[in-house]
Image: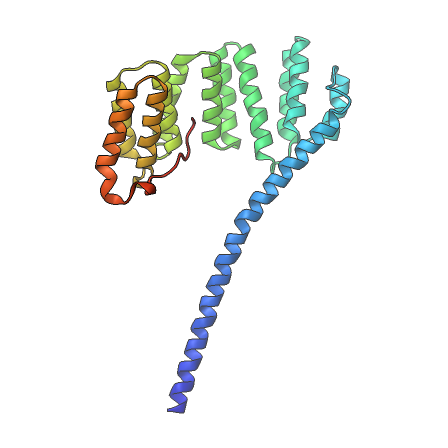
Amino acid sequence: MDDESEGCDQDDGNKCHAVADRTGSNAKKSDERPTKRARKQSRELEISALEERALQNGIPQTPDEFEKLVRSSPNSSFVWIKYMACLLVLADVEKSRAVAERALKTISVREEEEKLNVWVACINLENDYGSPREHAVKKIFQRALQYCDPEKVHLALLAMYEKTEQYQPADELLDRMTKRFKTSCKIWLYRIQFALKQGKDVEYIKCIVNSALLSLPQRERINFLTQIAVQEFKCGMPEQGRSRFELILREYKKKGPLECLPGPRNSPW
């Protein structure tokens, strides 16, 4: 009997150790996430401080001055992009391109956002000075996709198209984006927002919404529909927005109290 009891105690002890190990492992993972975020925020603050110190005596006005600045702040996309702009003011597009290439090679691979900023500057440069423009933009866009987060690169190109009022390429890009990122609530919301801005009719919006609902995960659907309704109110379509809210309440009231409706997540608005 004592042997059995001892065996049970040992088994219980082993189980406790196993649970403790798992708990410790989960806690470690939980601790790693905020630590990673904290490191990223700390690095961003460090880069920002370097930029401020570098510009204490004013923004450089000549290539020689910028050369000194990029040597002291090699990971600052802000400085590199200012250098590119300086050369464009001097009408030296090729040198501006060369500076962009240097920036992409010089900025540390760990500084993903800084590199992305330079790629976005390259896209803008080719949109303004590329020849032929469409081919030049497409070429730099395809290159950026190889090194950066594809969704962020697509959104950067979309922002450029909208800013420069290139609505046809923007519309075509959004079609491709909703196919490539079909489970992204954010991308579908951008698609709806663009359609609303372009004054598309109710049936057109309805078609996009139905396509989105077929692609989005179940957990994202209420949030998606809520955001569309809010935007419809903002765009002067209160009847459509009200009808959509009524649909949400009718379809989802059995799932729980209204307090369970999510707040705005992944919203471009």
Residue 187, percent from left and from top: 39, 29
Question: Is residue 3 or residue 119 the one in the foreground?
Answer: 3
**Which residue is pictured at 62% across the width and 18% down the height?**
97
Judged left or right of residue 129, residue 265 is left
Q: Quadrant of the C terminus?
A: top left
Using the rendered view, name the quadrant where residue 204 is placed. Answer: top left
Judged left or right of residue 81, residue 249 is left
Judged left or right of residue 126, residue 209 is left
**Which residue is pictured at 49% across the width and 33% down the height?**
149
Residue 14, percent from left and from top: 45, 74
Question: Is residue 99 or residue 218 the one in the foreground?
Answer: 218
Q: Is residue 177 visible?
A: no
- The residue sitting at the top extreme is 91
Q: Quadrant of the N terminus?
A: bottom left
**Which residue is pictured at 50% across the width and 60% down the height?**
25
Using the rendered view, name the quadrant where residue 213 is placed. Answer: top left
